[in-house]
Image (cartoon, grey):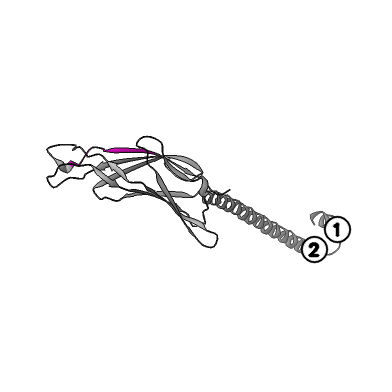
Amino acid sequence: MQSKIASLPTSSGNYDKDINNLYAEMESLQEELDNTLAEVDTMLAEWEEEQVVAEEAEQADELTRWSLEVSNSNSLVVVDQYHSPSRIEESDIYDIRLTLYNNMTNSDGDLIALNDLYLDLTFTPQSSSAVYINEKNTWLDTVKSPYIFWEMDIVTRGDDKYTRRISFTSERITVPKGEWLDEANHELGVKPTMELQLEFNLEYVQ
C-alpha cells in the first residue's frame, strides 16, 4: 500500500490528509495484527502447558498405589509392618516384614505363648479407575522360617470384575511368649517376639 501511494501520479488536488489517514489506518491495523498474534502465541503456550500437565496426570493414573492394612485375631498382639519399595504400585515383588509383640499374660500377670493367632493382610488400590490384576501370578509367600501358608481372597466388582482388594489370611500361628523390656515397669511393653519375612508379588493383567 505504501508503494502504491508513493507511485500515485502528481495531481492538482491536495490529498495529503487522505494519505496521512491511510497511513494511520495502516499503523492501527498493524498494531491490531501484532496484538492478535501475541494473543495466539499466549494461547498456544497455555495449551502446550495444559497438554504436558494432562499427559503427566495420565501417566500418574497408570500407576495405581496400593495401601496395606495388617490386622490380627488378638488385640494383645501388636504387629508392626514394613515393606520395600515403600510404594506398592507397579508389577513387582515387594519385601514385607512383620514384627510381632506378644503381650499375652495369664491370671498371675506372667507372659505366655499364644497358640492360635491369625494374621490378615489386605491390599487396597487407591485409584478412581478400574484395576485388574493377574490372579494366577499374584501371591504372598513366607521366605524365611517360620514358614506360614497364606490363603488369598480377591474381591471384585462390576460386570468386568475389576479388583477392589486382595486379602491374605494366615494359617494358625503359634507366637512365643514375650519378654518385658523392663521387668520393673511392664507398662513399657515387651520386646519383639517374632518376625515374619514375606514376599508379595503383584502383577496386572496385560
Q: Which residues are magenta?
A: 188-197
Tag 2 secondary structure: loop
Looking at the picture, tell me which residue is in the foreground, 56 or 165: 165
Mark 2–mark 1 CB contact (< 8 Å): yes
Q: CA distance from mark 2 to mark 1?
A: 11 Å
Identify the residue at horizontal 14%, vertical 37% (top origin).
183
Locate residue 169, reporting x and y percent.
Answer: 38, 49
Identify the residue at horizontal 66%, vertical 55% (top origin).
37
Determine which quarter of the picture holds residue 140.
Answer: top left
Identify the residue at horizontal 25%, vertical 44% (top origin).
114
Give the amino acid type for the residue marked by disc 2 in the picture.
Answer: Tyr
Q: Earlier in the sequence, mark 2 or mark 1?
A: 1
Give the amino acid type for the residue marked by disc 1 in the picture.
Answer: Leu
Locate residue 71, reporting x and y percent.
Answer: 33, 50
Q: The N terminus is located in which quarter?
A: bottom right
Residue found farthest to the right: 9
Is residue 172 left or right of 155 when viewed as pictured?
left
Residue that label 1 marks? 8
Residue that label 2 marks? 15
